[in-house]
Image (tube, helix red, strand yellow):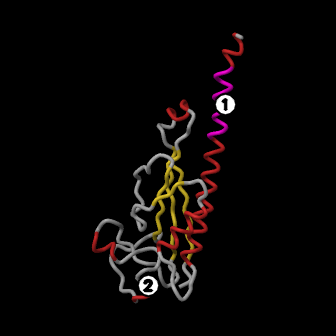
Amino acid sequence: MVEFALVAPLLLLLLFGIVDFGRVIYTYVTINQAVNEGVRTAIRDSALLPTNADVETAVKQHAVDVVLANPCPNGPITAATPPPNQGWVYITEPDPPSTPEALSPTLQDAPGGQMWAFSTGSCSATNPAHDHAPLQVSIRYNFVPFTPLIRQITANSIIITAAAVYNTEY
């Protein structure tokens, strides 16, 4: 009994640590898959260009069991911590220009930027991707372990990030 009382806490910590590690790996793989599917949706050329909402929907469909939000779809990608066990989706150009570009009306709703970002000031002033420009879809996810000791060691959060950059087809 004494030996079990000494070994049981370490055994339980190891067991739950392995479960938390598995959850981290699962979340990482899931958001990487979602980012790749989202950027594939964003770059395709068709009669109707995909919008930010189309990209966000594709990301959320492929992010099974992961809660994602989109507080400001076109960034800026901040260092702020998302809520516990939730992530933020960003659809941006890798290096967005600082000034507005003159665009045709067909590109104003393309992924990577919205023209309203300049007038409202609530989001980044990124421009829609065009002319085979690179487009980036990113996720910042705040993973909180459920093992109390590991939660204390990690200060209640492990930030997992994933990003994919492809060139647009339009």
- Specify which label sits upstream in the sequence, 1 or 2: 1
**Do residues under tags 1 and 2 come within 8 Å of each other at their CB atoms?**
no
Residue that numbered label 2 is attached to: 107
Q: How many marks?
A: 2
Residue type (three-letter) at the residue carrying disc 1:
Leu
Circle 2 Cα neighbour tier, 10 Å, few/some/many (<14 / 14–19 / ≥20): many
- Residue 10 lies in the magenta-colored region: yes
Name the residue nearer the viewer: 96 or 75.
Answer: 75
Where is residue 134? Give x, y as percent: 52, 75
Residue that numbered label 1 is attached to: 14
* Residue drawn at x 53%, y 46% as measured from the top left: 143
Left or right of residue 18: residue 111: left
Q: Which of the 4 quarters of the picture holds residue 116?
A: bottom left
Where is residue 22? Give x, y as percent: 66, 44
Give residue 79's mark. Answer: none
| Dominant SS type (magenta) | helix
SS class, disc 2: helix
Residues in magenta? Answer: 8-20
Looking at the image, residue 26 lies above or below residue 15? below
